[in-house]
Amino acid sequence: MKQSKYIFITGGVVSSLGKGIIAASIGRLLLARGYKITIQKFDPYINVDPGTLNPYEHGECYVTTDGCETDLDLGHYERFTDIRTTSANNVTTGKIYQTVIERERKGEYLGKTVQVIPHITDEIKRRMLQLGADGDYDFIITEIGGTVGDIESLPFLEAIRQLKWELGSYAVSVHLTYVPYIAAAGELKTKPTQHSVKELQGLGLQPDVLVLRTERELGREVLVKVGHFCNVEKDCVVQSVDLTTIYEVPIKMAEQNLDVVILRKFGIKCDKSPDLGNWQNFINRRKQADKELNIALVGKYDLQDAYKSILECLSQAATYNDSKVITHFVQSENLTHSNIASYLSTMDGVVICPGFGQRGTEGKIVAAEYCRTHDIPTLGICFGMQMMVIEFARNVLGLENANSIELDPTTPYSVIELMAEQKSVTQMGGTMRLGSYSCELSIGSEAYEAYGQTIIQERHRHRYEFSIPFRSQFEKAGMLCTGINPDSGLVEIVEVPACRWYVGVQFHPEYTGTVLHPNPLFLSFIRTQIRKQIE
């Protein structure tokens, strides 16, 4: 098997610079040159995965095809590259320590004292090399979460130091830093970048390539200065300036030959430009879009990263319909029957967002009722779908106090039940119904018209389900179950055909939408809103 080449990506100065976007952009450029790639993320927090984290802590929890709850950066990886990630693509400190401790308890270290070096770093290296051993990849891009200087990141940086030594010409290091603009002085300051690189060098790591994050265009003299002071070749210092959309980043990186210099570091010469035709077409359509759609996101997390994949899927679908989406976050805790019109009456469409727990649920139910009775195109996702079911039960079926057993264990009408296989679960983390499952669509339904086929695969993250004993009542009253899991009979999709477009899905369609292949359900949702405007 061929030896995979590794591109290690680290960050310095401050967090939230966009390491994931740079990693995904490098991946897109290498794919555009015909290479086979994958991307992995190593997160330094001790949680085994982000599944139990509040979205305010870490943004959305992204789910892979094999049912691993992961960092939201894996969503960027998939959207940019069209690759499908698995549990091997996201590793946390928690997973590393859990593995090492389990081995120690089994006596696998032969009585040795277990230490960070070599046992923790060896496990990190094993995980880093696993994708190269298991898959036929030309390049494996490895992003390290956090910022250089964080205590939590030190074992990962030490592992990279060792691997760079062991892999030799098969490893390249890319460091993303920040160049701030001091308005009072009217100057760009490179000193934070110099200190960040010095910190890396003190750990035995010399970056091969620097990406300078900045709000203002950096002159050539600034790039040369940084390279000079950081021991990096001048053409290996590029800038990442604020852009109107993250999807322009691969184009801007290609213009600065980021992929060319990385390949040169591996001893690979480039005799042609990357094929970014389809990507550029997407960017052009986005810029030329001449219609605007106002879409409300009814949820309880007032943080864009909490609904990152939904926002991106809406944007992608709108672009392919020559439209722009203006999203309006609506705090579901604030919604009542008396004020709901002020929030939703001017919207072209509404997304009732996923989420867990009691807070804000009644507001989502109020929103579902308003959308259904005022014929506003509506997409309910996971928990949002369940709120649509509860609303219909209460206001159409007349089942007073109908609810989910999750929210009210004493409800006389539990139209949303705990799944049978979940009743014996005692731990929270990684125990939900997770990953990709089949769904069979009813011919003639909105879902079937969107996907154009009867069997689809979508990803899930839930413990509760539509209560099958109530199905006939719902369907007689006008809410049809149009998507069913062929193996378990689980209701995956509900629709109200009397409405223009009123669809609730138990799965998360936002996890499968990419730049070059937008999710069909979101495309249909957007098209309906455009038709509504025309009418």
Image (cartoon, rainbow, N blue to C red):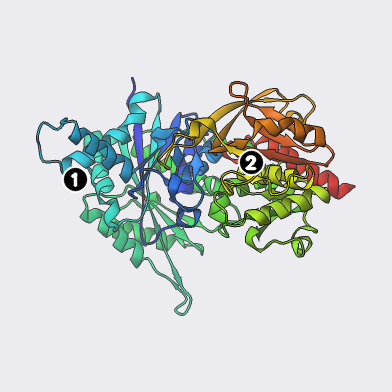
Q: Secondary structure at mark 1?
A: helix
Asked whether, in this view, residue 398 is left or right of residue 328, the answer is right
Q: Quadrant of residue 164?
A: top left
Q: Is residue 259 above or below residue 18?
A: above
Who is closer to the viewer here, 201 or 495?
Answer: 495
Residue 398 position, x and y percent, is 78, 45
Residue 437 position, x and y percent, is 56, 27
Amino acid type of the residue tagged 2 in the rendering: Ser
Q: Secondary structure at mark 2?
A: strand
Residue 139 position, x and y percent, is 39, 33
- Residue at the image position 71 percent from the left and 36 percent from the top: 494
- Residue at the image position 63 percent from the left and 34 percent from the top: 517
Which residue lies under the disc numbered 1? 116
Who is closer to the viewer here, 228 or 345?
Answer: 345
Q: Earlier in the sequence, mark 2 or mark 1?
A: 1
Who is closer to the viewer here, 491 or 399?
Answer: 399
Who is closer to the viewer here, 108 or 14?
Answer: 108
- Which circle marks residue 414 in the picture? 2
